[in-house]
Image (cartoon, rainbow, N blue to C red):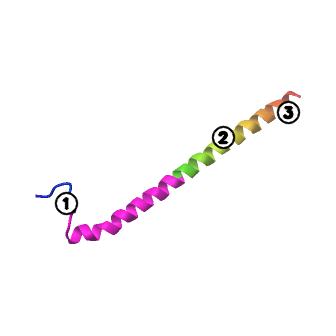
Amino acid sequence: MTTANTPEKGFWHQVGRPFRALGRGIGRVLEALDLVSLVVNIVRGVIWLFRSIGRAISDAT
């Protein structure tokens, strides 16, 4: 019987360890890319807003 406190042992557990680490690393990279994508989209939205305000002001004069 295994409990939560005893570490798992065995061939497949040892083999799976690098793949779990690789999966975590890829997950972190994807999270960073999602954050960069979010920031880029926010900046694009702000630029679009300023351009449309500037266009509206220039058209009014």
Q: Is residue 3 left or right of residue 18?
A: left
- Image coordinates of residue 40 in percent, x first then y, are 62, 48
Badge 1: residue crowd in 10 Å (few <14, some 14–19, many ≥20): few
Q: Quadrant of the N terminus?
A: bottom left
Q: Is residue 8 left or right of residue 41?
A: left
The residue at which mark 3 appears reads as 58
Relative height, residue 46 to residue 27 (above, below): above
Q: CA distance from mark 1 to mark 2?
A: 52 Å
For marks 1 and 2 on the same chain, the one whose residue lies earlier in the sequence: 1
| Secondary structure category for the residue under label 3 | helix
Query: Disc 3 and disc 1: Cα gap in Å?
Result: 71 Å
Rendered location of residue 16, percent (x, y): 29, 67
Q: Earlier in the sequence, mark 3 or mark 2?
A: 2
Residue annotated with mark 2: 45
Start-end of magenta stretch? 8-33
- The residue carrying pointer 3 sits among few (fewer than 14), some (14 to 19) or many (20 or more) residues within 10 Å by Cα, namely few
Kindly identify the residue that appears in the image at 20 percent across and 67 percent down.
9
Q: In the image, is residue 17 part of the stretch drawn in magenta? A: yes
Q: Nearer the viewer, residue 18 or 2?
A: 2
Seen in the image, is 30 located left or right of residue 11?
right
Residue 6: mark: 1
The picture places residue 56, in percent across and down from the top left corner, at 80, 31
- Crowdedness of circle 2 by 10 Å Cα count: few (<14), some, many (20+)? few
Q: What secondary structure do most residues of the magenta stretch adopt?
A: helix
Answer above or below: position of 28 versus 46.
Answer: below
What's under tag 2, amino acid-wise? Answer: Gly
Task: Please tell me in which quadrant of the rendered image residue 13 appears.
Answer: bottom left
